[in-house]
Image: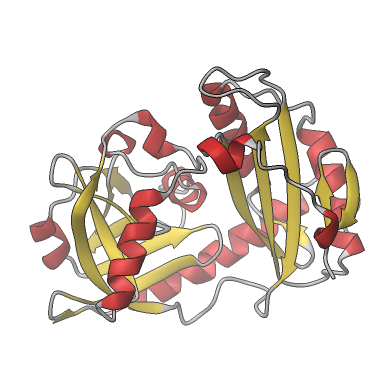
């Protein structure tokens, strides 16, 4: 049985006791981060930590543990669960106390979980998917969509419809008719030498891998443009990618009756794996 860190101590996961008054359960009052583990170490940690802090600031939730404190707990959790290769780390923070829309406190409570996974790096060849458009309920174009809050209702509806229609993925539109993101990923299109992703103002998540690609302009990727993407732009693309912290980069190879290649996606994934491993080598302390 996995060991987790809950509030202020380690315990078996079956001993986690969350009351019915819990604000995450009642109101979705919190946020989370999903982080890949490679060689027993979390990758792209600083991207995730920065986003977590930005989201907590937006929500007005106070978390006692700082960067080094969280890393110490994460390291201990990984070691207690004997993860030495690939894994997945999930950090959930929610507002403690009771209250209704007016909370009793802004103090945050912490849950850290780690799981073994069969892959020690992002997969190459990349995972390929068949996608549809989801526009039954659109994403609002505002700042909440940029953060990993505990409310993902639109994405759940998109996932259910995609599964019912025998698709692996859905491209979700916003209230302006643009493609904002996918079910659990950001969206990129490759057109010639141009790599394009929707701006955050279109309501999609401020994804960590998305930010890695933006930060790597001029290195292994020439340029990433932030520009609104319409359906016609997707259909005219040479390749369609999705990115998230768990899978790295995936490719949409079937969309609206059209087939898309994914050769460049494979090249990009190899570079992402190098960056991911290098990012973990900069963590403080010994993780070997």
Q: Quadrant of residue 241?
A: bottom left
Q: Residue placed at 82% from the left, 61% from the top?
A: 14
Q: Nearer the viewer, residue 281 or 151?
A: 151
Residue 263 position, x and y percent, is 34, 78
Q: Quadrant of the C terminus?
A: bottom right
Q: Nearer the viewer, residue 96 or 75?
A: 96
Q: Nearer the viewer, residue 93 or 232?
A: 93
Q: Nearer the viewer, residue 271 or 130?
A: 130
Q: Answer whether residue 288 is visible to the viewer in this image.
A: no
Residue 36 position, x and y percent, is 64, 60
Residue 121 position, x and y percent, is 63, 72
| Relative side of 155 to 231, left or right | right
| Relative side of 87 to 209, left or right | right
Q: Quadrant of residue 100?
A: top right
Residue 84 position, x and y percent, is 83, 70
Total marks drawn? 0
Q: Residue placed at 47% from the left, 48% from the top?
A: 216
Q: Residue placed at 33% from the left, 75% from the top?
A: 163
Q: Is residue 260 above or below residue 226?
A: below
| Relative side of 206 to 8, left or right | left
Q: Quadrant of residue 90?
A: bottom right
């Amino acid at each position: 049985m996995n060991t987790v860190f809950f509030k202020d101590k380690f315990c078996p996961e079956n001993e986690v006791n969350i009351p019915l008054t819990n604000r995450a359960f009642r109101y979705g009052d919190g946020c989370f981060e999903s982080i890949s583990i490679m060689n027993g170490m979390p990758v792209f940690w600083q991207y995730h930590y920065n986003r977590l802090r930005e989201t907590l600031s937006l929500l007005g939730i106070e978390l006692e543990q700082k960067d080094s404190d969280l890393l110490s707990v994460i390291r201990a959790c990984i070691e207690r669960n004997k993860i030495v290769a690939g894994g997945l780390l999930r950090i959930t923070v929610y507002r403690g106390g009771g209250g209704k829309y007016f909370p009793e406190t802004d103090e945050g409570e912490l849950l850290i979980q780690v799981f073994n996974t069969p892959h020690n790096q992002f997969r190459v060849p990349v995972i390929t998917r068949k996608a549809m458009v989801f526009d039954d309920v659109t994403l609002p174009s505002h700042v909440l969509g940029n953060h990993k809050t505990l409310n993902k209702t639109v994405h759940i509806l998109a996932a259910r419809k995609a599964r019912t229609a025998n698709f692996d993925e859905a491209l979700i539109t916003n209230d302006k008719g643009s493609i904002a993101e996918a079910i659990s990923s950001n969206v990129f299109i490759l057109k010639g030498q141009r790599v394009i992703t929707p701006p955050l103002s279109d309501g999609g998540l401020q994804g960590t891998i998305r930010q890695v690609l933006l930060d790597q302009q001029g290195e292994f990727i020439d340029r990433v443009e932030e520009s609104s993407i319409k359906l016609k732009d997707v259909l005219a693309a040479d390749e369609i990618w999705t990115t998230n912290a768990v899978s790295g980069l995936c490719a949409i190879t079937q969309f609206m009756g059209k087939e898309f290649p994914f050769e460049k996606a494979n090249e990009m994934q190899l570079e992402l794996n190098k960056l991911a491993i290098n990012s973990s080598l900069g963590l403080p302390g010994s993780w070997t």
